[in-house]
Amino acid sequence: MTGSLREELLQRSNNHASSTNCWQAISDGVGWHEPTPSHCWLAGSRTVSVVIPARQVGYCLRTVLDALEVQHHRYRFEVIVVDDASTDDTARIASSHRVVDRFVSLPRRMGAATARNVGTALAGGETVLYLDGDVVVPPHVITDIAARATDTTLLVGFQHHLAYEDHFRDPALLARVPRLEFDTRVVWRPPAGRRLPYTGITLDKPLDGRPLDGTRDFIDLGHGRRYYDWDLPRMVASAVLAAPRSAVLEIGGFDSEFDRIGRAMADTYLGACLIAAGLLVIPLRQAVGFHLDPPDAPQQWQHKTATLPRTVALFQSLLDRPAPQGRTEGFIADMSTLLQHCKEGP
C-alpha cells in the first residue's frame, strides 16, 4: 500500500458472499446468521480472547461477566478486563470475578482505545472479541465467533440499548432475546433538514433507513460506496467486534488520539485501517447484545454529540495519510512500557 488510506479504501471490495456461502456449505446446516450450537465441529476453529475496556461500569459489569461465564462454548477462551482508572467498584468486581483471567488497571484515565490496546497486547487468542463493559451477550456468541473467524475477516455484532431505568428496575428484561432492529445500523431514522455530522449531507425529507438490509449485509459498501450517511468503516463498532489479533497489531491498534478529543470514531478508524489491509467486514445478525445504559446516559450522549465534529475532523485528516502497516513491533514495545505502570491482579 503506497497511497493514502482514503485511496486504499476505494480499491477494496467487501463482497464476502463466497466466504459466507463456503462456511455454510461445511457447517452441518447452521446458517451464517444462526446461533451456533456448542457441538458444531467448527466451534474449535479459532482461539478467542475477550477484551473488555471498563470505565465506571460498576452498575452492570457483574452482569456482563456473568453472561460470559455461562457461554456454551466448549473450548477455553480468555477474558481480559482493563480498567480505565474507574473510581467506582469496577476494579473490585472485575478482579474478583471467576471468569476473568487477567485484570489490569491503567495508572490514570487514558480512554477506551488505550484500554483495548493494552488488552490486545495481553491477549493470547488468535481472534480478539472487543466487548464493551456494558454489553451483555447471549450464550452462543463466543461459539458464533470462534466458528466463523479468520485472519481476513472483521465480524461485526450489534447492540440493543436498554435505558438505565428499565434494566435497573426490571432485571428480568435480560432474559429476553435482544432485538437486532434496535441498532441504528439496522433501522435508522435520521432527521430531515439537519446536517448529518459524518458526511455533512442533509436529507430533505424523513427517511425510514435500513443500512444493513439496504447494503446486502454491507456487501454494497465496498470500494468506498455509501448508504446515505453510512460507509463501510462506520459499520465497524467496537461494542461487539471480533478481529484477528495479528491484523490489529500490524496497524498499531486503536488510535488513542481519539480518546483525547471524544468518545467516537476510534473504532471507525480501526475499521478503515483493517479494510485497507484487505479484511472483509461481515455482520453476524445473531450476535446482538443488550447495551445497559448508565444512569447518566443523557449527559454522556450530550458530551459525545458535542465532541463529534472534532472526532470526525480527526478521522477525515487521518484518511489523507498513508494507511498504517508494519507497526507490530512498535505497538508491543509501547504497550509493554505502559504495562510497567499498570496494576495487575486483584
Image (cartoon, rainbow, N blue to C red):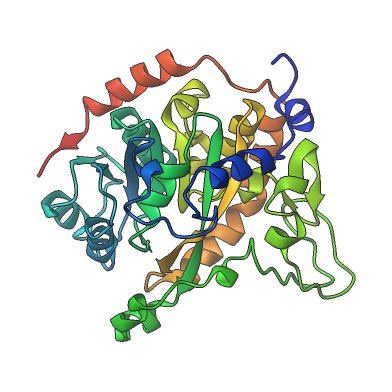
Most distant residue in the bottom direction: 169
Residue located at (68% from left, 43% from top)? 17
Q: Is residue 190 left or right of residue 327?
A: right
Residue located at (37% from left, 74% from top)? 295
Quadrant assignment, res 167:
bottom left
Residue 161 horizontal/vertical position (percent): 48, 71
Quadrant assignment, res 7:
top right
Residue 45 horizontal/vertical position (percent): 38, 36
Most distant residue in the right direction: 204
Q: Quadrant of the C terminus?
A: top left
Query: Is residue 221 or residue 324 the one in the foreground?
Result: 221
Q: Is residue 77 above or below residue 211?
A: above
Q: Is residue 344 above or below residue 231?
A: above
Q: Is residue 236 left or right of residue 143?
A: right
Residue 260 horizontal/vertical position (percent): 49, 41
Q: Is residue 199 left or right of residue 179?
A: right
Q: Is residue 107 left or right of residue 228?
A: left
